[in-house]
Amino acid sequence: MAIDYMIQYPCPPRAELGDETILDLLKEQERAQMIIHAYRASGDNRPPSEMGFEFTRRTPEGEEGTQLIVVQDVLDRVEQLKALEHHCAQCPANRLGKPYGCAGFIEYPISAAGEAWLLNRLPSLQEPLLWLLLKQGVENFMYDGRDIAALRAASDAYFEARSAPTRRLNEFDLTGDQVFEMIFNVGTIQPNHAGVLLLFFHAIRRDLEADAIIHIGEADYRAYPFLIEPERTDDATIDELKAFFNALYVAWALKVPLFVAP
């Protein structure tokens, strides 16, 4: 299970297959490659038509279903991706420089370190304009984190921490559940919301006047270089969150939405 995302830049693969199909096929392709590698590493040289694996899918309600998958069937399905991947070569949304480099995943469970990393990047009262915008946004959009808290309580498959971490931001507290809702539970992220999230989580500079903050959705990205860098101490969740914010930045720079499916 994972949070899936894709930059919605107009292109032939998206027009023909759709975002969700592309994302599903990419995940299937990765699984198939992992299985083939595991077979070969153990000295097993049978063809993919004789390789199989069990795939367990868990629904948001916590129900599980197991299915036997034949690797060759997966390879046949992902040929749809290969037939269209030449369109990715010059695509400005291809942030990774590889086929379908506009897409990415954040694997569950979300680590406690990853949640702490998100909370620690939020503005404090030392940055009053952004702090006030964050406070008003949480109140106006009623980010109470209730649905995320229920998900966390129902299963340990989604979050490493069974209780949400909290950060005190002077006059109010913000929990990991609220932060997760604010980023990943709002549907497709439009450029204006993307710009605000980039400011909140310090992915771009935030020493701005009120008018620049208000119009951040239309800003020229060249004045706002991406600030988040990978570090050797990052765990898998932090590494994937940083990649997500990079995709969010590219979508914002291109003035297109970012599709997100938690």
Image: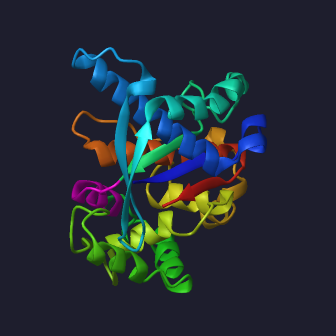
**Whole-percent x, y for residue 98 in the image:** 56, 24
Image colouring: rainbow
Q: Choose top left, top right, bottom left or bottom right for residue 187.
A: bottom right
Reply above or below: 134 against 190. below
Badge count: 0
* Residue pictured at 22% horizontal, 61% vertical: 160
* Residue 105 is at least partly visible in this image: yes
Q: Choose top left, top right, bottom left or bottom right for residue 15.
A: top right
* Residue pictured at 30% horizontal, 73% vertical: 152
Name the chief secondary structure element in magenta: helix
Image position of 157 (left or right of 22): left
Magenta stretch in the rendered image: 108-119
Image position of 105 (left or right of 259): left
114 in the magenta segment? yes
Q: Choose top left, top right, bottom left or bottom right for residue 239.
A: top left
* Residue 207 is at least partly visible in this image: no
**Whole-percent x, y for residue 174 in the image:** 34, 76
* Quadrant where the image shows the N terminus: bottom left
Reply above or below: 203 against 226. below
**Residue furthest toward the front?**
50
**Whole-percent x, y for residue 97 in the image:** 57, 24
Q: Nearer the viewer, residue 107 or 180?
A: 107
Q: Nearer the viewer, residue 193 or 213?
A: 193
* Residue pictured at 21% horizontal, 19% vertical: 42
**Whole-percent x, y for residue 67 in the image:** 40, 51
Q: Nearer the viewer, residue 199 or 14?
A: 14
Q: Nearer the viewer, residue 101 or 178?
A: 101
8 in the magenta segment? no
